[in-house]
Image (cartoon, helix red, strand yellow):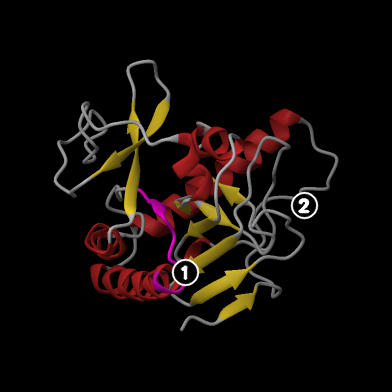
Amino acid sequence: MYDEQTVDHAGQTCGASSSAAADAATLHELKKAVRREKIALRRAMPPETRSAADAAINGFLLDIVRTEKPSGLVAYVSDGTEPDLAPVMRYALQAGISLCLPRFEQSGAYSIVTVRSLDFPVSHWDIPEPSADAPAAPPELLAEALWLVPGVAFDPACRRLGRGKGVYDRLLARGTGKTIGIFYELQRCAELPCEPTDQPVGRVVTESGVFGCTNNVRS
């Protein structure tokens, strides 16, 4: 059984306080600086460290999925530097849980589709992605599913910093089930610069454990 903790300790301070009087340009630059730092750290992880962290993260997630028994699981395919969720995705398929993944569309937006295997073609981003004939996930499934959300950085309030394109901010703003941010510990910040359109997650899982969030109403 996983032991959920509350993130209330200080991590590395990333950028200025979200409550600071900073204009949009300043926030944009702060976010860019955090992204550069955290992406570089994640890329520099030794393979053995990454492998051990991925195993721990999947262990915590498997405990959550087995305990909470969601009808659907919205996950992602790692780009090679993000935590690899293949074990928990395989479990979902074996357990009869509807597995959903993002797919890039010609319109430039992302949709969430259902898949029946982890055998995908490589997309134009050089990342395996569901094929064009994978059906769109029903809205009622997405509203009840457990969402596993990647990101570049996180803080104790479960604020999440993505790559800057707003993909998950838009997806999460539509309304979802429970959300879990998936990160390595080196992506932790004491406080992230954020904007009203930035969507937090309800919990965070790293190789160190499952963390509840402070000052955050999203479940």
Whether residue 163 is visible to the viewer of this picture, yes or no, is: no
Residue bearing the label numbered 2? 17
At x 18%, y 49%, the residue is: 117
**Residue situated in front as seen by the camera: 181 or 144:** 144
Q: Which mark, by number, is residue 206?
A: 1
Name which residue lies at 69% across and 43% down. 194
The amino acid on which the numbered mark 1 sits, given as a three-letter code, is Thr
Which residue type does callout 2 highlight? Answer: Ser
Q: Report the residue at 22% width, 26% height from top.
A: 132
Provide the secondary structure element on which disc 1 rests: strand
Q: Is residue 3 above or below residue 185?
A: below
Q: Circle 2 sits in a helix, a strand or a loop, which is it? A: loop
Q: Relative to residue 211, is residue 17 depicted above or below?
A: above
The quarter of the image holding the C terminus is bottom right
Q: Position of residue 207 (x, y in %)?
A: 43, 73
Can residue 50 be seen here?
A: yes
Q: Residue 197 has which mark?
A: none
From the viewer's perspective, tell me whether residue 16 is left or right of residue 53.
right
Residue 52 in the image: state x and y as whole percent: 30, 76
